Amino acid sequence: MITVQNIINASIEKVWDFWITPKHIENWNTAFDNWYTSYAENDLKAEGKFRYEMTSKDKKEHFDFEGIYIKVEKFRLIEYKLSDNRIGSIHFEDFGESVKITEIFEPNKTDSESMQKQWCQDVIDNFKKYTEKF
Protein backbone atom coordinates (compact mmCIF):
# COMPACT_ATOMS: atom_id res chain seq x y z
CA MET A 1 0.00 0.00 0.00
CA ILE A 2 1.08 3.57 -0.68
CA THR A 3 0.29 6.40 1.74
CA VAL A 4 0.37 10.15 1.06
CA GLN A 5 -0.90 13.02 3.15
CA ASN A 6 -1.05 16.75 3.65
CA ILE A 7 -2.57 19.29 6.04
CA ILE A 8 -5.01 21.72 4.46
CA ASN A 9 -5.51 25.06 6.22
CA ALA A 10 -9.29 25.27 5.82
CA SER A 11 -12.44 24.05 7.54
CA ILE A 12 -13.60 20.46 7.13
CA GLU A 13 -16.71 21.69 5.30
CA LYS A 14 -14.62 23.52 2.69
CA VAL A 15 -12.10 20.68 2.33
CA TRP A 16 -14.88 18.13 1.88
CA ASP A 17 -16.72 20.31 -0.65
CA PHE A 18 -13.60 21.02 -2.71
CA TRP A 19 -12.61 17.32 -2.64
CA ILE A 20 -15.96 15.97 -3.90
CA THR A 21 -17.41 18.66 -6.20
CA PRO A 22 -16.67 18.12 -9.93
CA LYS A 23 -16.08 21.83 -10.72
CA HIS A 24 -13.37 21.89 -8.03
CA ILE A 25 -11.94 18.47 -8.93
CA GLU A 26 -11.34 19.73 -12.47
CA ASN A 27 -9.18 22.53 -11.04
CA TRP A 28 -6.88 20.60 -8.68
CA ASN A 29 -6.81 16.98 -9.85
CA THR A 30 -3.51 16.79 -11.69
CA ALA A 31 0.02 15.64 -10.99
CA PHE A 32 1.75 17.06 -14.06
CA ASP A 33 1.71 20.56 -15.57
CA ASN A 34 1.07 19.19 -19.06
CA TRP A 35 -2.12 17.31 -18.03
CA TYR A 36 -5.48 18.39 -16.64
CA THR A 37 -8.86 16.96 -15.66
CA SER A 38 -11.08 17.80 -18.61
CA TYR A 39 -14.21 16.26 -17.08
CA ALA A 40 -15.24 14.99 -13.65
CA GLU A 41 -18.35 13.22 -12.46
CA ASN A 42 -18.84 12.13 -8.88
CA ASP A 43 -21.76 10.31 -7.25
CA LEU A 44 -20.49 10.22 -3.68
CA LYS A 45 -22.38 7.38 -1.99
CA ALA A 46 -21.85 3.67 -1.44
CA GLU A 47 -21.93 2.04 -4.91
CA GLY A 48 -21.86 5.50 -6.52
CA LYS A 49 -19.49 5.96 -9.45
CA PHE A 50 -16.77 8.48 -10.12
CA ARG A 51 -14.94 9.23 -13.36
CA TYR A 52 -12.25 11.77 -14.09
CA GLU A 53 -11.17 12.26 -17.69
CA MET A 54 -7.47 13.09 -17.74
CA THR A 55 -6.24 14.87 -20.87
CA SER A 56 -2.84 16.09 -22.01
CA LYS A 57 -2.81 19.83 -22.67
CA ASP A 58 -1.84 19.18 -26.30
CA LYS A 59 -4.99 16.97 -26.51
CA LYS A 60 -3.01 14.04 -27.95
CA GLU A 61 -3.51 11.69 -25.02
CA HIS A 62 -6.24 10.97 -22.50
CA PHE A 63 -7.46 8.30 -20.13
CA ASP A 64 -10.27 7.80 -17.63
CA PHE A 65 -9.62 7.37 -13.93
CA GLU A 66 -12.73 5.71 -12.57
CA GLY A 67 -14.26 3.46 -9.99
CA ILE A 68 -17.00 3.05 -7.42
CA TYR A 69 -17.33 4.05 -3.80
CA ILE A 70 -17.42 1.29 -1.22
CA LYS A 71 -18.03 3.36 1.91
CA VAL A 72 -18.59 7.06 2.59
CA GLU A 73 -18.63 8.71 6.03
CA LYS A 74 -19.18 12.44 5.56
CA PHE A 75 -16.20 14.53 6.75
CA ARG A 76 -14.30 11.36 7.77
CA LEU A 77 -13.75 8.65 5.18
CA ILE A 78 -14.09 7.72 1.52
CA GLU A 79 -13.29 4.14 0.46
CA TYR A 80 -13.19 3.26 -3.23
CA LYS A 81 -12.47 0.51 -5.73
CA LEU A 82 -10.93 1.48 -9.05
CA SER A 83 -12.01 -0.02 -12.38
CA ASP A 84 -8.97 -2.35 -12.25
CA ASN A 85 -10.12 -3.61 -8.79
CA ARG A 86 -7.42 -1.86 -6.78
CA ILE A 87 -8.73 -0.38 -3.55
CA GLY A 88 -8.00 2.82 -1.68
CA SER A 89 -9.22 5.13 1.02
CA ILE A 90 -9.08 8.80 1.91
CA HIS A 91 -9.17 9.80 5.56
CA PHE A 92 -10.09 13.30 6.76
CA GLU A 93 -9.01 14.39 10.26
CA ASP A 94 -10.63 17.63 11.41
CA PHE A 95 -8.47 19.90 13.59
CA GLY A 96 -10.83 22.89 13.50
CA GLU A 97 -8.90 25.36 11.34
CA SER A 98 -7.12 22.62 9.39
CA VAL A 99 -7.74 19.13 8.03
CA LYS A 100 -5.26 16.32 7.58
CA ILE A 101 -5.95 14.27 4.45
CA THR A 102 -4.37 10.82 4.21
CA GLU A 103 -4.82 8.69 1.10
CA ILE A 104 -3.88 5.01 1.13
CA PHE A 105 -4.06 2.98 -2.06
CA GLU A 106 -2.94 -0.19 -3.77
CA PRO A 107 -0.27 0.52 -6.39
CA ASN A 108 -0.69 -0.66 -9.94
CA LYS A 109 1.69 -3.32 -11.26
CA THR A 110 3.06 -1.39 -14.24
CA ASP A 111 4.54 1.78 -12.69
CA SER A 112 7.12 2.06 -9.93
CA GLU A 113 5.71 2.56 -6.44
CA SER A 114 7.92 5.62 -5.93
CA MET A 115 6.50 7.23 -9.09
CA GLN A 116 2.92 6.44 -8.03
CA LYS A 117 3.55 7.84 -4.55
CA GLN A 118 5.02 11.04 -6.01
CA TRP A 119 2.13 11.39 -8.47
CA CYS A 120 -0.48 11.05 -5.74
CA GLN A 121 1.45 13.37 -3.40
CA ASP A 122 1.56 15.99 -6.18
CA VAL A 123 -2.21 15.71 -6.60
CA ILE A 124 -2.80 16.23 -2.87
CA ASP A 125 -0.31 19.12 -2.87
CA ASN A 126 -2.26 20.71 -5.76
CA PHE A 127 -5.46 20.21 -3.77
CA LYS A 128 -3.88 22.05 -0.82
CA LYS A 129 -2.76 24.97 -3.01
CA TYR A 130 -6.12 25.25 -4.74
CA THR A 131 -8.22 24.97 -1.57
CA GLU A 132 -6.15 27.42 0.43
CA LYS A 133 -6.17 29.93 -2.46
CA PHE A 134 -9.99 30.16 -2.67
Image: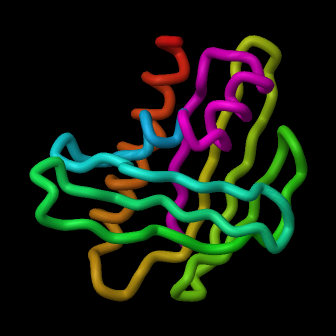
- 37 or 5, which is in the foreground? 37
Q: Quadrant of residue 53?
A: bottom left
At horizontal 67% and vertical 16% (from top left) the residue drawn is 10
Residue 16 lies in magenta, yes or no? yes
Magenta residues span 1-23
Give the percent coordinates (x, y) of residue 129. 43, 22
Residue 31 lies in magenta, yes or no? no
Left or right, residue 32 beside residue 126:
left
Q: Quadrant of residue 54?
A: bottom left
Relative height, residue 7 to residue 28 (above, below): above
Q: Quadrant of the N terminus?
A: bottom right
In the orientation shown, which residue stands out farthest toward the right?
73
Relative height, residue 127 to residue 25 (above, below): above
Give the percent coordinates (x, y) of residue 107. 45, 76
Left or right, residue 47 beside residue 1:
right
Give the percent coordinates (x, y) of residue 52. 48, 59
- 74 or 42, which is in the foreground? 42
Give the percent coordinates (x, y) of residue 123. 41, 44
Left or right, residue 2 beside residue 108:
right
At horizontal 28% and vertical 63% (from top left) the residue drawn is 115
At horizontal 62% and vertical 63% (from top left) the residue drawn is 50
Q: How many marks?
A: 0
- 42 or 33, which is in the foreground? 42
Relative height, residue 20 to residue 71 (above, below): above
At horizontal 38% and vertical 49% (from top left) the residue drawn is 37
